[in-house]
Amino acid sequence: MRAPVALLALLTLASPAIAADEPKPVMTMDDKTIEASVVIDPDLKAYPPLYDRLFAAGKREYDKARADAAAEFKSTPDLFSDGRKFFYKRTDRLRSVVGPYVSVVRSDDTYEGGAHPNHVVDTLLWNAQAQRFMNIKPFFKEMADNGPTLTRLAQLIRAALAAEKKARDVEVADPDTDQWLTNVKPKITDIGGIALAPSTEAGKSAGLIVYFSPYAVGPYVEGEYVVYVPYAAFAATLSPQGTALFGGARPQGDDKND
């Protein structure tokens, strides 16, 4: 079971910004206003155009976080008393490579003096052949918002979330009417961050891994949620491109990489 992100974030703020088992940051600073860093998985260097875009995006957010902290320090110095400071950390992590498709999990951890740190997780899907970002629409016959495919995917994801909540001793009476799970809507922008799951079959994906930040589908204390939907559950909705992409089973223990 994953530890609540609220706890993990608090531990992060009480310790060095970079954990011992992760790569060195590509940019970092620690001054009287902010502890900031950007970490990019070195494995992503195998895709230079993608890596360059991740670096540029990380630098923009890093520079913005530094500027915001400096401005706040100037206007409200008491906020930084007793050694308190802002915190910002961007992490881009390679999750899977399936054919030309590269799934990246991105997290932004911040603290600006509020009640608790904030953690936002999302995903990026990169087509290494076309050298551009994309979404999962080409893998399906039809993907209109509120259409049959996204309605089906939203139902599957809500059901998977309900099962994960039950594993955490959080009861859900009906996944399709639960006040939190109804945030998963049949829209491409409202079904969560999607990554392609690796497969036991070479060059295939076993299904979808879906990421949700704290507050997205549950109270902050429940933390981040990550669920898996096997491709067999939506196989009938796949386009020829999707049918060629999906197959096999998720490797045993792959969930530990979520």
Image (tube, rainbow, N blue to C red):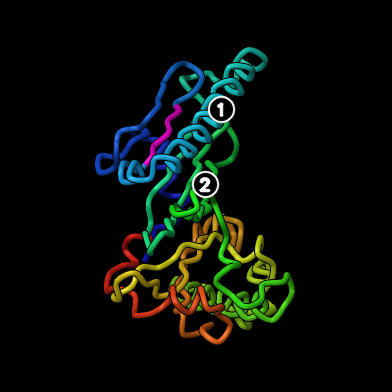
Q: Position of residue 107 (x, y in %)?
A: 48, 46
Q: Which residue does the numbered mark 2 point to in the structure image?
A: 119
Q: Residues within 10 Å of mark 1 (few under 14, many from 20)?
A: many
Please report the residue visible at 51 percent of the width from the left and 84 percent of the height from the top.
235
Q: Assess whether mark 2 and mark 1 are in contact (beta carbons under 8 angstroms).
A: no
Quadrant for residue 1, please give it: bottom left
Please report the residue visible at 64 percent of the width from the left and 78 percent of the height from the top.
149
In the image, residue 167 sits, relative to residue 221, either above or below, namely below
Q: Nearer the viewer, residue 164 or 168?
A: 164
- Looking at the image, tell me whether mark 1 or mark 2 is earlier in sequence order: 1
Residue closest to the far front: 130
Q: What segment is highlighted magenta in the picture?
A: 36-40
Q: Secondary structure at mark 1?
A: helix
Quadrant for residue 148, please give it: bottom right
Q: Residues within 10 Å of mark 2 (few under 14, many from 20)?
A: many
In the image, residue 134 sits, relative to residue 83, either above or below, namely below
Q: Which residue does the numbered mark 1 point to in the structure image?
A: 65
Please report the residue visible at 46 percent of the width from the left and 67 percent of the height from the top.
209
